[in-house]
Image: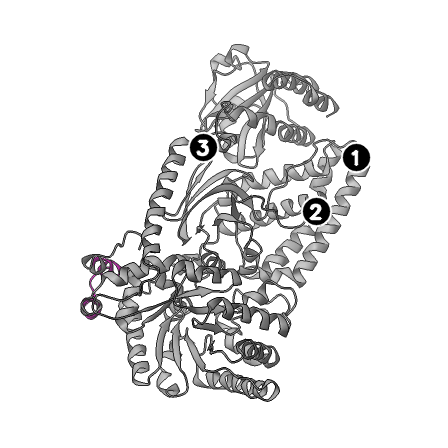
């Protein structure tokens, strides 16, 4: 290892150092041959350095990834030691290398963040068994070689090449589901970044072992803290995730593997980096979903310990205005940490477009794509990326042709946006005279900046829980009052619908130790949670009343299932109104109290609330999941059912007729209305107030102003009575008949 350190420190070009390395390895391991193979972009393996084979074979002998023992090591990402190589079924004889006299074979993969980048081989003429310590030594050397070998893959950038090309050749394309439409370009910022080893070699083995032990203690302490505070913000089942982390962090075999690396002369970071590369390579070859998840956990743990050793436990810093956030999964609170850093795009392996992280992405107006398989194994920190959240594709390290096409797309999108901007001051009025209010979905104060820019008629949904999710402590009454006042001030007299706390499910409050549930979407959440925490709920209602002062106030209760829940919540609101009138002498000039339709049960109860509820607003995401019994956080079913379905539309039509008879105003605040054809369906059913992300208001307004709603309604009802084949395609065809652009729907 000391000799290798000296070679690495020598001056000279990369290839001459590789020649020196293979001579050193062959001599130290008493091997007749030492060779290095480079994995080329198309997957073949090229001999780039050797001691013992014919020199003229260098840069000429090339093997397919499916060929020979070298290909076997590259495919499996595992070391292989064979006493008599010619007898192995994968052996492939290459006469130009002069390898016919050699029998014993030891090959190890050269691993880097992106996977296997090469293979390191030693061979002996006689049959022999390579010891475990020899295999470990060769694996250690291969890790040190990884960075040198990787530089051979990178084509040297021309002097005048744009900066985006310096990371080498194109990295390929990935695809996923569009969470928030748009186009973005910038450098990759990993949410859970890989921290490279600062140094490879240990100058003092004992001191390095102590550093590793201290790092392990710090890691376990940080996981314990997350179990108490941060773990609740993770989506899925946070307790299971953190328990898995805790078990892995306590695993003595993992710690012993790291200590073995230090005893061989590596630094703590380099030993950990070797383990991380092995986990990454195995992850890429794993087919079993459970195994892939456990390997993901191991790799995450490796990265976390690297950050602990480097004193960088916190989230990565996003500098400048060109960041593209890359993450396996994100909770809404985690994504909000990046709200003001100028992100140009968001990429997630998480696959549910109706997840709350996706909703936050839309609220932020940042192009976002989810459901991207192997995302974090394909992208490295700092890679240049194009986020095409119109087509649902990701371009990694794009070449000039792709980048030029992207710029053309941006120009076309700008033209479309200019067309929408021209409609900003005009009403969303159909050709036959129906006016539809187009409102903004919001949850952050910065969302209100989009009111004028998008030409929204008001705020149809203000999600109040985000203020709670971003804090480890409960917001004080004064903080809530200040936020709600700012929202009303920015709305400048336009209506604002405040939805009361919608917590639970995948939005878990860090400040409260919520009980673990088998199915949190159907559990103790939303209005159920609020009514069981009357102190917390009344404090919010008091803040809303105080913030409104003598201005109009509109309050909406989420996920009401039975009339009694609405009545209990409204009674608490009325008590706060009376309290405020007594203490301050002020009360809202007008009070409207609404209910959010998210459960089918409420739809069949609306006649019982006639005269008590002022408006109903459809929450499409939860309504869809409960109507079709399809968990929106489960990728395999979250996209299976469509709101544009005869059964769902018939249900909504029935609700609309019931509300019209009871003089209950109708609106929609779900994400589905962002699609012009879906917005037309709701308008045709009688829902004439639609709330959506700011980016959707222009396209929806353009569609509404082009349509004869009566004629569209007749065509829709005819198709609902006699559906044939894909109902969404029937609706898209109907919209196209009315001149509506359905290309992105």
Query: In the image, what residue occupies the spot 37% across and 48% down?
Result: 390
Snapshot quadrant of residue 481? bottom right
Q: Is residue 626 left or right of residue 229?
A: left
Helix, strand or loop at label 2? It is: helix
Check disc 2 and report the residue beneath it.
308
288 in relation to 620, above or below = above
Q: In x, y percent, where is residue 164?
A: 49, 33
The residues tagged by marks 1 and 3 sit, at their Cα atoms, a distance apart of 40 Å
Q: Nearer the viewer, residue 63 or 548?
A: 548
Q: Dot 1 surroundings within 10 Å: few (below 14), some, or many (20 or more)?
A: some
Q: Nearer the viewer, residue 174 or 102?
A: 174
Check disc 1 and report the residue beneath it.
205
Q: In x, y percent, where is residue 727?
A: 25, 62
Q: Which residues are magenta?
A: 715-733
Residue 514 seen in render: no
In the rendered view of the protein, which quadrant contains the C terminus?
A: bottom left
Residue 722 drawn in magenta: yes
The residues tagged by marks 3 and 2 sit, at their Cα atoms, a distance apart of 32 Å
586 in relation to 694, above or below = below
Q: Is residue 662 left or right of residue 378?
A: left
Check disc 3 and report the residue beneath it.
170
Q: Is residue 60 left or right of residue 717?
A: right
Q: Are marks 3 and 2 in contact (CB under 8 Å)?
A: no
Upstream in sequence: badge 3 or badge 2: 3
Q: In x, y percent, where is residue 312?
A: 68, 46
Upstream in sequence: badge 1 or badge 2: 1
């Amino acid at each position: 290892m000391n000799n290798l350190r000296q070679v690495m420190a020598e001056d000279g070009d990369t290839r001459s150092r590789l020649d020196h390395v293979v001579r050193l390895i062959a001599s130290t391991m008493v091997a007749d041959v030492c060779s290095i193979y480079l994995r080329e972009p198309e997957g073949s393996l090229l001999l780039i350095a050797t001691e013992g084979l014919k020199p003229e074979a260098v840069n000429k002998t090339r093997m397919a990834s499916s060929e020979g023992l070298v290909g076997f090591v590259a495919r499996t990402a595992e070391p292989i030691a064979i006493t008599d190589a010619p007898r192995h079924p994968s052996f492939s004889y290459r006469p130009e290398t002069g390898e016919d006299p050699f029998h014993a074979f030891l090959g190890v993969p050269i691993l880097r963040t992106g996977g296997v980048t090469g293979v390191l081989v030693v061979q002996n003429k006689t049959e022999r068994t390579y010891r475990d310590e020899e295999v470990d030594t060769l694996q250690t050397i291969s890790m040190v070689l990884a960075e040198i070998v990787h530089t051979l893959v990178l084509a040297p950038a021309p002097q005048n090449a744009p900066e985006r090309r310096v990371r080498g050749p194109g990295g390929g394309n990935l695809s996923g589901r569009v969470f928030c439409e748009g186009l973005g370009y910038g450098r990759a910022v990993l949410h859970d970044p890989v921290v490279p080893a600062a140094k490879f070699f240990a100058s003092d083995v004992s001191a390095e072992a102590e550093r590793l032990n201290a790092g392990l203690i710090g890691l376990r302490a940080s996981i314990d803290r997350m179990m108490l505070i941060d773990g609740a913000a993770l989506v899925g089942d946070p307790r299971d995730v953190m328990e898995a982390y805790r078990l892995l962090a306590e695993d003595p075999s993992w710690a012993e593997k790291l200590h073995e690396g230090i005893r061989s002369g590596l630094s703590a970071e380099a030993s950990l980096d070797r383990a991380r590369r092995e986990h990454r390579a195995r992850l890429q070859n794993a087919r079993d979903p459970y195994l892939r998840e456990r390997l993901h956990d191991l790799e995450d743990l490796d990265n976390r310990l690297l950050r602990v050793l480097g004193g960088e436990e916190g989230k990565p810093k996003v500098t400048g205005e060109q960041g593209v956030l890359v993450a396996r999964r994100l909770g809404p609170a985690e994504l909000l940490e990046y709200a003001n850093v100028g992100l140009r795009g968001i990429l997630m392996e998480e696959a549910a477009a109706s997840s709350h992280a996706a909703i936050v992405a839309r609220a932020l107006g940042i192009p976002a794509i989810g459901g991207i398989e192997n995302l974090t194994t394909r992208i490295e920190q700092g890679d240049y990326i194009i986020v095409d959240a119109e087509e649902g594709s990701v371009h990694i390290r794009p070449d000039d042709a792709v980048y030029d096409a992207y710029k053309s797309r941006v120009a076309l999108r700008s033209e479309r946006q200019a067309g929408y901007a021209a409609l900003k001051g005009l009403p969303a009025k159909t050709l036959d005279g129906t006016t539809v209010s187009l409102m903004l979905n919001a949850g952050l104060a910065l969302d209100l900046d989009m009111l004028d820019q998008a030409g929204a008629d008001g705020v149809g949904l203000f999600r109040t829980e985000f203020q709670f999710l971003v804090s480890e402590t409960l917001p004080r009454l004064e903080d809530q009052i200040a936020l709600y006042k700012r929202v009303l001030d920015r709305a400048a007299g336009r209506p604002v619908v405040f939805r009361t706390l919608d917590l639970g499910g995948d939005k878990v409050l860090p400040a409260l130790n919520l009980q673990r549930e088998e199915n949190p979407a159907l559990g103790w959440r939303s209005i159920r949670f609020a009514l069981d925490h009357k102190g917390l709920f009344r404090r919010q209602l008091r803040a809303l009343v105080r913030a409104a002062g003598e201005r109009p106030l509109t309050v909406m209760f989420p996920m009401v299932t039975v009339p009694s829940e609405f009545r209990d919540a409204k009674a608490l609101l009325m008590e706060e109104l009376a309290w405020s009138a007594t203490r301050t002498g002020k009360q809202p000039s007008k009070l409207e109290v609404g209910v959010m339709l998210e459960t089918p049960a409420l739809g069949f109860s609306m006649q019982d609330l006639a005269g008590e509820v002022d408006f109903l607003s459809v929450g499409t995401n939860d309504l869809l999941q409960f109507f079709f019994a399809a968990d929106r956080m489960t990728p395999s079913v979250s996209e299976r059912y469509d709101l544009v379905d005869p059964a769902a539309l018939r249900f909504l039509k029935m609700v609309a007729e019931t509300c019209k008879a009871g003089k209950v105003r109708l609106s929609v605040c779900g994400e589905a209305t962002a699609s012009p054809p879906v917005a037309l369906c709701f308008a045709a059913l009688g829902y004439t107030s639609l709330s959506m992300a700011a980016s959707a208001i222009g396209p929806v307004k353009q569609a509404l102003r082009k349509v004869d709603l009566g004629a569209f309604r007749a065509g829709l009802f005819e198709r609902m009575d006699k559906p044939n084949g894909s109902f969404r395609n029937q609706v898209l065809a109907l919209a196209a008949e009315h001149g509506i652009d359905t290309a992105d729907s």
